[in-house]
Every structure is written in structure tokens, then in C-alpha cells.
Image (spheres, helix red, strand yellow):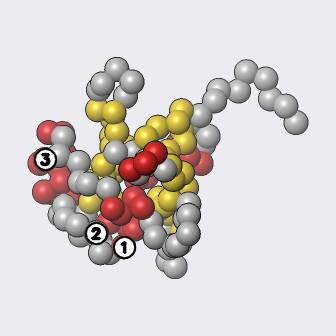
Amino acid sequence: MLVRNAPMARYLRIRQIVTTDRPGALCIHAICGINPDGTHWTLTREQAVSQIEGGMSAFYIEKSGGKRFDVVVAFDPCVNKYLKTIPDRDNSNELLFLPNCLHFTHTLKSRAVGAGGCD
């Protein structure tokens, strides 16, 4: 069925993450990037999941050499939704290797949620 005038999803590059002390992929509290006009954007994990599921946004990360990994919604064993990259050759979640976002909007908030590296 063809839907006319349906809005296309925004394709946004994730450049950094905001982490918590939670283990594994659930340690990602938020994702961050840069808008075309140079401004900073941030979405919580829940907001990003909602935008992917609603078709509003699609996300990706880009590694050196221009290799892109699309980001999808996955479920952990307890059925919690989280973000992960579609694996290339292995099962690693490339999101976990992104740097922590140091944008001033996260500095105090990150300390409040227990920012730290992901396991």
C-alpha cells in the first residue's frame, strides 16, 4: 500500500553517547550529534527508541574510512529496549565504542546519572 505525503525519517549521525553505571547496552542514557546548522542535539535512549519505532528518525554511526553502521532497537533478556548497531562481521555494538559526550548540557546531568564507561 502506497502512502502519499508520508514524511521521510530524518537520517541522523550519532557522534557521542551519555552513559550511566548500568551494565552492557543499557548503560547508554542518551545519544548526541550535530545538526546541519552546527547545533548540538541530544535524545534519551527512550526518545530515540520512540523515534525509530515511529518512523520519525533513523540513526547511524560512522567509523573511520566512512564505514556506516545503522542503529536499531533491540531487546535484552528482560525485554528492556535498547539501541544497537546492526553487526557487520561480529556481534559487537559499535555504539558502546563512541566517546562520552562532553557538551555542557550533559556535564551536570551525567554526574547525576552516574556517567562512566560501558562494560
Q: Residue at x 29, y 26 (%)?
A: 39
Q: Going by the image, does 48 lie left or right of 70?
A: left
- Amino acid type, residue under disc 3 in the picture: Thr
Dot 3 falls on a residue whose secondary structure is: helix
Front: mark 3 or 2: 2
Q: From the image, which quarter does the C terminus lie in?
A: bottom left
Dot 3 or dot 1, earlier in sequence: 1
- Tag 1: amino acid: Gly
Please give left or right for residue 91 compared with residue 116 in the image.
right
- Label 2–label 1 contact, CB within 8 A: yes
Residue 11, labelled with which disc?
A: none
Which residue lies under the disc numbered 2?
118
Looking at marks 2 and 1 on the same chain, the residue that comes earlier in the sequence is marked by 1
Could one spot residue 100 in this view of the protein? Answer: yes
From the top left corner, tell me how far across and down residue 117 is, in percent. Answer: 23, 66
Q: Which residue is mark 3?
A: 107
Front one among 53 and 65: 65
Query: Which mark, residue 24?
Result: 1
Left or right of 1 on screen, residue 88? left
